[in-house]
Image: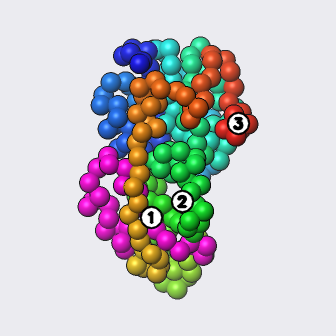
Amino acid sequence: MVREGEVQIIACETIDDEIRKVNRGRFPCRFLEHGLHRTPEQLRERLQDTILQVKEGEVILLGYGLCSNGVVGLRSPHKWLIIPRVDDCIALLLGSREAYREHFQRQPGTYYLTRGWIEHGRTPYQQYQEYRHKYDPETAVWICRELLKNYTRVALIDTGAYELEGCRPHAESFAAFFGLQLEVIPGTIQLLHDLIEGRWQRDFLVLEPGQEVTEEMFRS
């Protein structure tokens, strides 16, 4: 069990609903913008800067996974650094790398959605809304269909952190517009509970002060 005053949280705004539900205001939390994921080098730089800005506490919890190697190279000179051992937020909200692999094996062509992704990210349907004002309708549709050419399903993850009614209409419109199957699938915030409660077993990287994150740590 970790105590107040010991911990600071740095997380992606995409999972702010889930973090807030499990944290309940116990520990200070900084949310970074989702757009940093588009350039892993920028994500790494911003995360490292934010880590170095943390002065209070002894432990930093990261609400990130490997994220296209965006966390590789991170280090905290004076604090412990705890990171979920998952590839990205999808695996984090499905419960584990193994849970994500099971979903992928059953239906590999799946585009996953959460409320955070809809509000802070850019789904192909949101991109279409932007592109149709820049290009002719046929070109806008073609660009977005190219982004989805390997997808057959839209999966809205029910993490239990909020009611789905607010984000279901976007998921339905997205799926219908591109002719994809829509399914609501169960998620879990158990890994985030474990992260915040200090239950850092095999599903987490536990780095000592000064230790650097490597890609191999996520594969072991």
Residue 140 in the image: above or below residue 21: below
Marks 1 and 2, how far apart at CA? 10 Å
| Observer able to see residue 46 | no
Q: Secondary structure at mark 2?
A: helix
Q: Amino acid at mark 1?
A: Ala
Q: Earlier in the sequence, mark 3 or mark 2?
A: 2
For the residues labelled 1 and 2, say whether their Cβ atoms are less than 8 Å apart: yes
- The x and y percentages for residue 164 are 29, 58
Q: Quadrant of residue 73?
A: top right
Marks 3 and 2, how far apart at CA? 21 Å
Q: Nearer the viewer, mark 3 or mark 1?
A: 3
Query: Is 76 in the magenta?
Result: no
Residue marked by disc 3: 220
Q: Residue furthest bottom?
A: 138
Q: Is residue 17 left or right of residue 62?
A: left
- Give me the residue at 29% from left, 50% from top: 162
Q: Earlier in the sequence, mark 3 or mark 1?
A: 1
Q: Amino acid at mark 3?
A: Ser
- The x and y percentages for residue 191 are 46, 38
Marks 3 and 1, how far apart at CA? 29 Å
Residue marked by disc 2: 103
Give, as a single range, the part of the protein colored magenta: 148-173
- Give me the residue at 62% from left, 23% from top: 207
